[in-house]
Image (cartoon, helix red, strand yellow):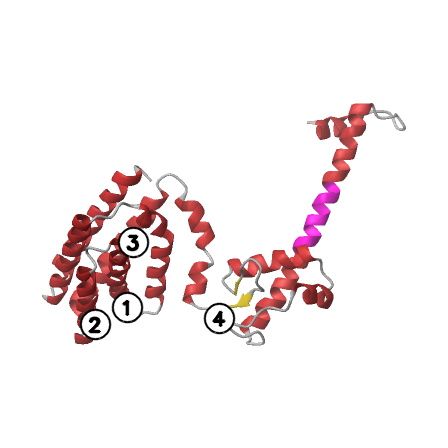
Amino acid sequence: MDSARFLSYKMNAPCGTALPGSLAGAFRGVLKEMTEAKGAARSTRAADGLIQIFEKQILDGTLRDGQPLPPEREIVQTYGVSRTVVREAVLALSNKGLVEARPRFRPVVRKPGYDAAIQAVGSVVARLLSAPGGVKSLFDVRIMTEAALVRQAAIEANKDQIAKLKDALAANEAAIQDSETFYETDMAFHGVLYEIPGNPLLPSIHRAYTNWLSSHWKAMPRLPDRNRANFEAHARIFDAILLRDPDAAERALRDHLAAAWEQVRQTFGEI
């Protein structure tokens, strides 16, 4: 409001008129805002340039997978930028999945791949999950994905893939009394479904679903009776795949995940 009063006054006051005290303060505020905006713009442009340099070096192999970025001080001296610019660039590279940045460690280059691409949107997904209905929306996408996967498994899974699914089911049954291990074997059973089509993107999607939803899943009370019900649902999915019945496999999968969501809803309410 003070800035607007200052601009109005300058447009209408006679030339050379001194500014009242309140408007003088507004004038200083306007100058400060303009200076800060210009400084932020310069910082962003410098960070963009540094991002492009490191992104090119990562993509062309000059900086290899697992190799740390140069020390912050060296980057500052080499490229003539501030530490703030370096940190902005590292954050952007981390958001793109091109480096792994941890506190007190130098950022490490990560080879671009499906996992990196999906991890790059992780912070966005986290914000979406915090919105009303966000978790349910993501879970619905998982249901649609896995419904298609079990149908394909029932039609196309080969002998080795069915054996791997059977082993995952056996491990899940053996863990019924140990809820922490049961959770891991539960995820592993579903993970096999994502491997069967042979599409390298699908296992990365499964790992992303697991990571994005894990805070809710791990916070749920897990009891042997509930574990057994989930195992039995897995067994029905497996039996339908073994019988080469895609319709039954999809029904079993949808029933299982609908029951799983009901368990989540009872624990957390509408999320």
Instruction: Compute the Cα span from label 1 to label 3.
Output: 15 Å
Please indicate whether residue 18 sits to the left or right of residue 185 in the image. Answer: right
Instruction: Indicate the position of residue 15 as horizontal and vertical percent values.
Output: 88, 28
Identify the residue at image location x=73%, y=26%. Answer: 5
Find the magenta span and give its range: 34-45
- Secondary structure under badge 4? loop
Picture coordinates of residue 141, whole percent (x, y)? 30, 52
Q: Tell me the quarter of the picture where residue 80 sits.
A: bottom right
Does the magenta segment cover residue 9?
no
Main SS of the magenta segment?
helix
Task: Check disc 2 and report the residue beneath it.
Answer: 161
Q: Which residue is mark 1?
A: 195
- What type is the residue that disc 4 sits on? Lys
Q: Are marks 4 and 2 in contact (CB under 8 Å)?
A: no
Q: Are marks 1 and 2 in contact (CB under 8 Å)?
A: yes
Identified at 55% across, 75% down, the residue is: 60
Helix, strand or loop at label 2? It is helix
Query: Which mark is first along the chain, 4 or 3?
Result: 4
